[in-house]
Image (cartoon, rainbow, N blue to C red):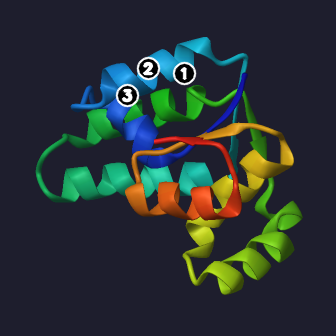
Amino acid sequence: MTIVLDVSAAIQILLKKDRKKYFSEIYEKSSWVIAPDLYIAEITNVLWKYNKAGIIPADECQQYVEDGVALIDDYFQTIDLWKEVLGESIRYKHSSYDLFYAILARRNSGKLITNDKELETICKKMKIECNG
């Protein structure tokens, strides 16, 4: 099974949050884990926010980013996705950042794995398989 792992689900796994078990089980069953290269910028920013809030020390943030980057088997360039993403963002009136993940799932017959309920709702409208 191919999955597209978004940062909200990756953070659940990495930081052992309340839905870690759920997302870890899906992750472990997958044969190929992919993400847009945007994932790296997003996970870096999320962990910076945890550091800024005084929740996670800088050295741990760096390790979490490294571990998060390693969760992905292959990255896809956003340059190859942006036109389709923009069209769907306009059509569904939803963030382009999120739709990079959705479009990648659609193009690769994969499941999008997210902890973002709004993105999960959009995926259902777009008929993109989503375990969120």
Q: Is residue 74 left or right of residue 98?
A: right
Of callouts 1 and 3, the N-terminal one = 3
Evaluate if marks 1 and 2 touch, with contact meaning CB atoms under 8 Å apart: yes
Q: How many marks?
A: 3
Closer to the camera in the image, 131 or 104? 131
- The residue wearing badge 2 is 24
Residue depicted at x 75% and y 71%: 85
Mark 2 and mark 3 lie on one chain; the one further toward the N terminus is 3
Q: Position of residue 98 (x, y in %)?
A: 57, 63
Residue at the disc numbered 3 = 13
Check disc 2 and give the amino acid type.
Ser
The answer to which image quadrant residue 74 occupies is top right
Query: Looking at the image, which residue is at 28% across and 33% down?
Result: 60
Discs 1, 3 touching: Cβ within 8 Å: yes
Q: Nearer the viewer, residue 59 or 46?
A: 46
Q: Which residue is mark 1?
A: 27
